[in-house]
Amino acid sequence: MVGEFLKRDSSNDLTASAARNEADKCARCGKCRSVCPVFAELKDEAFVARGRIWLFEALERGEIRATPELRKIMSACLMCQRCAETCPSGVRFMRVIEAARERLSREMGLPFGASFVFRHILTRRRLFDFAMRSVSLLQRIVPGERKGNLRHLPLFFRGGKWLPPFAKNTALQLHSGGTRVPGARVRVALFVGCLTNYVYPRIVSSTIALLQKARIETNVPASQLCCGVPALAMGDIGAARELARRNMESLQSAQCDYIVTVCASCGRMLKHEYPDLVGGSAFSVPVLDVSEFIKNHTDLNLEPLSDTVTYHDPCHLRWGQGIASEPRQLLSSACQFREIPDNMYCCGQAGTFHIFYPEIAGLIGRRQVESIALSDADYVATGCPGCILQLNDLMAQAGIRKKAAHTVEILSRAQFGETMSRGVSAENHFDPQ
Ligand code: SF4
Ligand code: SF4
């Protein structure tokens, strides 16, 4: 069955052909070396866009073969898109890395657990809920260290990840369906994403409360699934396409004016990958990140907090969607805003990257955490639940008494006059003891 959905079909050829077109544009100038976080740590030409393009072309010409070493090189990329943003030749490197991973998965196979999860669990919400509840239970009963609300899961994560506990009620359990707002001028369909759903439901609560205040109705379709980023990142384009189709049906059934996302990676996937996966435009209404939507489509009157807050750019928001000014402008009106002194680093999370390459992820993330430590901010706002998880993990490990939270949580505190002293996302964030 695994071979069945990894077999070559015309869409695989399209993926490879688009990637070859992008690879052809590479002028071998090496400018991507100056911005790549992985190259900065490893100083190895194979681990930067130019080297990977060269290897992809050699693979396509049959000069090299699919090997575990080549798979390691192709999978040790954050897919952060800094190289594409910097590239003077306009190489869309994501096309190359996705095609390389797809080919390697097709020729070498995916780990059975991964293909089973993508195909049979992510596509079934109840089964996914059951699997997450089981992990949550294990998280409570497996002996391990504990730091504040973060728990050590030595059996599941190499490198000793500190994770927040899973939420008692998921965002979809709490908020599925519509929120009626008398006199609403706009309706949005909210795409939640897995990490927000299972670990940070308060991000959705804050978003709905803010939009309600702005007289905007929110619909959270219960049938939405994982956006498909993990499947795409591991080269299972068939599974990613199936999830894209199911989410398009789910979100379009809400019949809204906008689709709003609260996760940078989900947002980039819906905006930029779905059209390529399904062909043509995926949605008939605009897809916007929540910061983009609140900045441009609401007139919230925020009461600035006295707390000092800085901002971490998620790669998939800044480089993947070109969104940098909107969250900063919102935070400037909601708190005492400070920039991180040197804010060009990635947190190192990058979906599954931090699980498969915890050492490199830790090296990359610690650079950003060291910069954050230099700021006098108490809180770090960001637009991606993955960054929240990674930054709180690394700050806890480094003994830094700051908390990461979603931008909408800070805005919600400012809008509704709540103090930050009891901690943002108190139910599931690191609370220094
Ligand atoms: S910056 Fe662009 S053109 Fe230059 S080597 Fe990197 S991918 Fe190729
Ligand atoms: S996507 Fe990011 S990690 Fe990957 S090659 Fe480009 S700059 Fe490096």
Image: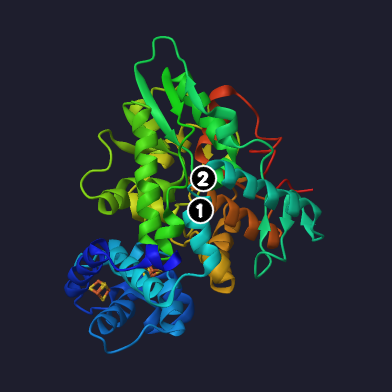
Looking at the rendered structure, the kind of residue marked 2 is Arg
Circle 1 Cα neighbour tier, 10 Å, few/some/many (<14 / 14–19 / ≥20): some
Looking at the rendered structure, the kind of residue marked 1 is His
Front one among 55 and 333:
55
Give me the C-alpha separation between circle 1 and circle 2: 7 Å
Disc number placed over residue 124 in the picture, else none: 2
SS at badge 1: helix
Picture layout, residue 424 above or below residue 300: below
At x 46%, y 45%, the residue is 263
Considering every residue shown, the one lying at the far top of the view is 182
Front one among 92 and 177:
177
At x 37%, y 23%, the residue is 187
Picture layout, residue 216 above or below residue 198: above
At x 59%, y 52%, the residue is 389
Circle 2 Cα neighbour tier, 10 Å, few/some/many (<14 / 14–19 / ≥20): some
- Whether tag 1 and tag 2 are in contact, CB under 8 A, the answer is yes
The image quarter containing residue 78 is bottom left
Please, which colouring scheme is shown? Answer: rainbow
**Rendering coords of residue 42 (x, y %):** 47, 80
**Rendering coords of residue 425 (x, y %):** 64, 38
Is residue 410 something one can see in this rendering? no
Q: Which residue is mark 1?
A: 120
Quadrant of image for the N terminus: bottom left
**Rendering coords of residue 201 (x, y %):** 59, 37
Disc number placed over residue 368 in the picture, else none: none
Q: Is 4 displayed left or right of 113 in the figure?
A: left
SS at badge 2: loop
Q: Is 183 displayed left or right of 131 in the figure?
A: left
